Every structure is written in C-alpha cells, then in structure tokens.
Amino acid sequence: MPWSYVNTEADNCSPKRSVPFDYGSNDDTVQPPSAYTGRVKEGKPLKKALYAGSFDPITAGHLDVINRASKLCGTLVVGVIQNPSKASAFTGEERMDMIRRATSHLSNIQIDQFDGLLADYVLRHQITVVVRGLRATMDFEYEIQMAQMNARLYHDQAETIFLMTNPEHSFVSSSLMREVFALGGDISGLVPDCVLEMMMKKAVTSKGE
C-alpha cells in the first residue's frame, strides 16, 4: 500500500487572484473555462492535482514545476512512480524524503508513491488535474501521445495540463544529473541542496563498501 507525507509546517493556504474573475453566476458549481485559471472563486480552488514522475532524483526543473503547479490547486500530489523493471539510483523512500525536504516551504503538497497505470491512481484518488512539464519538442511528442491515451482512461474525471519548463532548466534531467555527478561535475543549483547532500552521502557510502 502506498504511503504519503503531508506538509504541516505552515497553515494551509491557496494563492489569491490579483484580478477577480466574473462568471456571471453565484452558483458554487460553476467550473473555470480552463484548468489554468486555478480558482473558480475565492475559497474555491481546484480540488486535487497530480504531478507524477520517477524523480530519481528530483531536480531544479521538477521543483520549478511543483512550485508553479501548487498555485493552481488546493492540493498537489507529487507521485513517485515505482517501476520494478527499471533500476533506480534511490529507493522510493529516499526519493520521497528528498521531495519532502525540497518542498517544505509549500503547505499544500502531499507526497505519495505508486506503481501501475497512472490512470488507475487518478481514478482511485479522485484527481481532477494531471500536471506534466515540457522541456522541448521531443517531450511534447511523447507527452501528447500519453495524454491522449490517458484521456480515454480517465473517463472524463481528469484533464492533463502542460507547464513549460523554465528555460534555464530546459536541459536538466535526473539521468543527466546523475551522470555528471558521477563523473565529478558540479551540479549545484541544478538540483535542490538536499538532493546534492544525499548524492554526496551515497557516493561516500559506496566508496566505503
């Protein structure tokens, strides 16, 4: 069974709109025209969004997407995907701990891990928005295919939205960070400080074995 960690270090709050929307109705069931609006009315955030990935490890690019996506919803679930057929540099628990530490400044983050179909998790946990980050054209071609497949599996429960990665992080990936670090390169600023600390600790442990 997956377990989760919910940040409780700050009071729950959701971002305020600088310019109010007028939907012409007092009906609380009115939905925004796009998931990008983030809120229907004051006090009515989108319920629950999911940002899933292997996060092996979480990078500055991932964290940028998490920071921005957290402003669009009441709760953002950061889902660590477990793939038994793929070797991971960090355990699921280690990845969750790094994410927890990197997002400790956010009050509406829930961290979970799961395996199997993303759509199954979405349906089981009443996710309404799935967030995906895009770095380049090659990302889009893959992500649009997956989004179209998942749309058939969501049964109209959820929508996929795409957030463009900050240009300064467009080249950053978990695998590249691991490779550069293993060869002695400096990746500070490209991964959260807690991740670099964990990678250095693991490297020292490996040398001592």
Image (cartoon, helix red, strand yellow):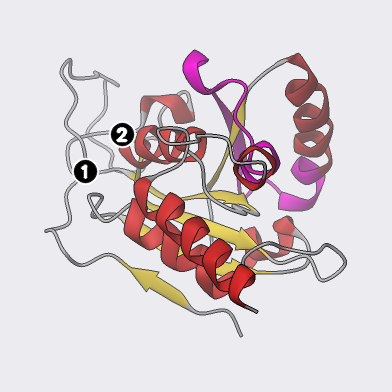
Is the Cβ of the residue at disc 1 closer than 8 Å to that at disc 2? yes
Quarter of the image with the C terminus is bottom right
Mark 1 or mark 2: name the one nearer the start of the chain: 1
Q: Is residue 68 left or right of residue 83?
A: left
Quadrant in which residue 118 is drawn: bottom right
Quarter of the image for the N terminus: give it. bottom right
Where residue 7 appears, as percent x and y from the top left, is 27, 64
Q: In this figure, which residue is indicated by the disc labeled 1?
A: 14
Q: Is residue 69 above or below residue 74?
A: above
Residue shown at the point (42%, 36%) measured from the top left: 188
Mark 1–mark 2 distance (CA, rounded to whole Å): 9 Å
Q: Is residue 197 above or below residue 96?
A: above
Count how many numbered circles sit on residues in the image: 2
From the viewer's side, name the closer residue of 81 and 148: 81
The amino acid type of the residue labelled 1 equals Ser
Q: In terms of depth relative to the viewer, which is nearer, 168 or 138?
A: 168
Report helix, strand or loop for mark 1. loop
* Stretch in magenta: 150-178
Label 2: how many Cα within 10 Å (few below 14, some 14–19, many 20+): many
Name the outermost residue toward the right. 85
Name the residue tied to disc 2: 39
Q: In percent of the image, x 40 and y 29: which residue is there?
A: 32
Residue 91: in sight, yes or no?
no
Residue 21, by quadrant, is top left
Q: Residue at x 26, y 50 (%)?
A: 106
156 with respect to 33 (left or right): right
Magenta stretch containing residue 157, yes or no? Answer: yes
